[in-house]
Image (cartoon, rainbow, N blue to C red):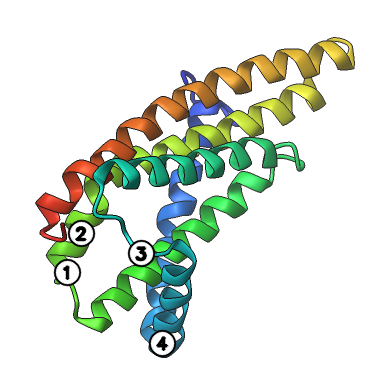
Amino acid sequence: MPGSKKGSPARTFLLLLLVFITASFLGYAFALGNPNVAIDAVKKIAEEIGPISDSSFKNFVLIFTNNFMVALFMMLSGLLFGLGPWFIMAFNGFIVGLVVRAVQLTGELSTEQIVLGIIPHGVIEIPALAVAGVAGIIWYREIVHGDEEAGERFRRGTVKALKLLALSILLLLVAAFIEAYITPSIAGIG
């Protein structure tokens, strides 16, 4: 995603990452001030996700499927005036910060285990989701600001968005593999 001008894909990508990181700190700060709310929220999330399987392959499929759906939703939400991906990145970042603090409060995992449970796959997964968000924003911008007929702008935006979504999906496959097969052993949670 070359370029650094205002509204460029690279700038949008970096800003989406910044939104995620900022929201993560806000989620963590919220959990500091509201520990019971944070723990209750994490319990509800854990109930919705269900138990982790003993099968790494089943976990891989579950993780990838979930992240694929988030990426697809990220891309499609870009059509909502280009705003959807910003809200989704902020929400997911907030939840990550909340979960990190709640897990710390439970004492079930050390801070090192929490970091090792997030970083190995997160350095690929979060940018992959941001790429999907950029895809949706580009699609929207192409439709609204393109130079040609509406149908052609929609088609060209769709092609650009799907190419970025394909990149996002490839990255999510790698991230899901790391999360299912590698993260548990290096974080000592497998």
Q: Is disc 3 placed on a helix, strand or loop?
A: loop
Q: Which residue is mark 3?
A: 51
Q: Is residue 63 above or below residue 38?
A: above
Type of amino acid at the residue the image marks with label 3: Pro
Type of amino acid at the residue the image marks with label 2: Val
Q: Which residue is mark 4?
A: 33
Looking at the image, tell me whether mark 3 or mark 2 is earlier in sequence order: 3
Q: Residues within 10 Å of mark 1 (few under 14, many from 20)?
A: some
Q: Is residue 88 above or below residue 172?
A: below
Q: Residues within 10 Å of mark 2 (few under 14, many from 20)?
A: some
Looking at the image, tell me whether mark 2 or mark 4 is earlier in sequence order: 4
In the rendered structure, find residue 115 and report the number of the disc placed on it: 2
Q: Residue at x 61, y 54 (%)?
A: 87
Residue 124 at x, y = what percent? Answer: 32, 37
Type of amino acid at the residue the image marks with label 4: Gly
Judged left or right of residue 165, residue 18 is left
Label 2, label 4: how far apart the Cα atoms are: 21 Å
Q: Is residue 34 above or below residue 27?
A: below
Label 1, label 2: how far apart the Cα atoms are: 6 Å
- Asked where in the image residue 80 lies, by quadrant, the reply is top right
Residue 174 at x, y = what percent? Answer: 31, 31
